[in-house]
Image (tube, grey):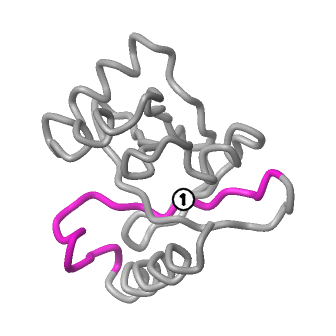
């Protein structure tokens, strides 16, 4: 992953934590969480800001990578190890990540596109199907 992305994410993470999850700029008013994964190869903790959708009492994230032809690194990491941590606002909790099967993915992704049309543009830019991942809190 490029330094520019890491620097950009670091700025967002600092702002997120300083303001209990409230962001300005491109993400102002958008539902953003911090997703903690373990590097599939390194084993090191990785933190990435990602938009999420709460629907029907469930929470989902989208491996869009802005329509790039490759999945984001965080997606590969949670497929290798589905034990993740989530920061939303001032709350932090452990969760299990699971990519959705095709039909359910399509329904959830359509709702995200309805709320945030840019996700539809991301899907149009790439030949891959953008995965939708459910984040289920651990009891």
At horizontal 40% and vertical 35% (from top left) the residue drawn is 126
Residue under the point 32% across and 39% down? 125
Q: Is residue 16 above or below residue 106?
A: below
Circle 1 packing at 10 Å, graded few (<14), some (14-19), many (20+), is many
> What span is colored magenta in the figure?
20-40
Q: Quadrant of the C terminus?
A: top right
- Relative horizontal placement of residue 50, taking residue 135 as reference (left or right): left
Q: Is residue 34 magenta?
A: yes
Residue 123 vs residue 12, the one in the foreground: 123
Q: Measured from the top left, where is residue 29 in percent x and y?
A: 16, 66
* Quadrant in the picture for residue 115: top left
Residue 67 locus on image (x, y percent): 38, 45
* Residue at far top of view: 103
Q: Quadrant of residue 26?
A: bottom left
| Depth check, front residue: 65 or 62 | 65
Image height of 59 relative to 18, above or below: above
Residue matched to label 1:
35
- In this rendered view, identify the residue nearer to me: 3 or 111: 3
């Amino acid at each position: 992953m490029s330094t520019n992305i890491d620097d950009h994410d670091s700025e967002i993470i600092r702002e997120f934590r300083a303001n209990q999850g409230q962001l300005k700029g491109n993400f102002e008013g958008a539902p953003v969480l911090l997703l903690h994964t373990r590097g599939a190869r390194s084993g090191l903790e990785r933190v990435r800001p990602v938009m999420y959708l709460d629907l029907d009492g469930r929470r989902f994230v989208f491996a869009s990578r802005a329509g790039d032809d490759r999945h984001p690194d965080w997606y590969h990491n949670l497929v290798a190890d589905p034990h993740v941590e989530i920061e939303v606002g001032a709350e932090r909790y452990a969760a299990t990540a699971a990519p959705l099967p095709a039909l359910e993915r399509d329904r959830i992704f359509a709702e995200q596109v309805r709320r945030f049309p840019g996700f539809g543009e991301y899907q149009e830019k790439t030949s891959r199907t953008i995965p939708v991942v459910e984040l289920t809190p651990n009891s």
